[in-house]
Image: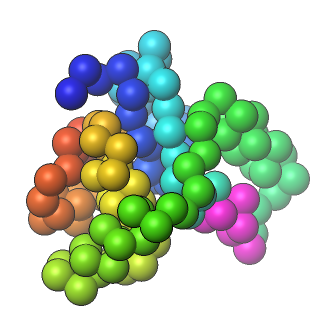
Amino acid sequence: MNGKKILADTNVFINLAEGKTGIEPHLQGKEIFVSAITEIELLGFYKITKAEKEYFKLLLNDCSVLELTSGIKERAILLKQSYRIKLPDAIIAATAQFLKIEFVTFDKGFANVPDLDLVLLDF
């Protein structure tokens, strides 16, 4: 993997919004992809403020949002069945696997998913 393209998990954007440090080096100079699930999770949070929504929209404008394809769905089904992970996580992990790019997340649960080029960030 060349490291120039990454798939960013939802929690990366949430931690950015909360002012966590050390995230930027993993994003700068990269082509950033996100699953449509991440877009829904960020913008669909029931307590989101107007300012937060605008902030996330600005961040997402700099990303390529990937819709659900048949290949991603097939991988997500296998991951969900094999590793008993939640549907949104299965779709996001399947997206990274399908694209064969680095997956940047704070969620240690993804360490159990095989065939992920995982970049596990720490708080």
Answer whether residue 80 is visible to the viewer in this image: yes
User: Residue at left 21%, top 44%?
Assistant: 118
Answer whether residue 121 is visible to the viewer in this image: no
Q: Decide: is 85 above or below 31.
A: below
How was this image coloured?
Answer: rainbow
Query: In front here: 52 or 91?
Result: 91
Residue 99 position by quadrant: top left
Q: Position of residue 69 (x, y in %)?
A: 51, 62
Name the side, left or right, on which 40 lies relative to 38: right
User: Residue at left 65%, top 29%?
Assistant: 62
Q: Is residue 47 magenta?
A: no
Task: Farthest residue to the top: give it.
Answer: 29
Q: Position of residue 67 (x, y in %)?
A: 59, 57
Residue 112 position by quadrant: bottom left
The residue stretch that appears in magenta: 40-46
The quadrant of the rendering that contains the C terminus is top left
Name the side, left or right, on which 123 lies relative to 65: left
Q: Decide: is 6 above or below 10.
A: above
User: Residue at left 74%, top 73%?
Assistant: 46
Q: Position of residue 83 (x, y in %)?
A: 18, 79
Residue 42 position by quadrant: bottom right
Query: In front here: 72 or 65?
Result: 72
User: Residue at left 56%, top 50%?
Assistant: 66
The quadrant of the rendering that contains the N terminus is top left
Q: Position of residue 117 (x, y in %)?
A: 20, 42
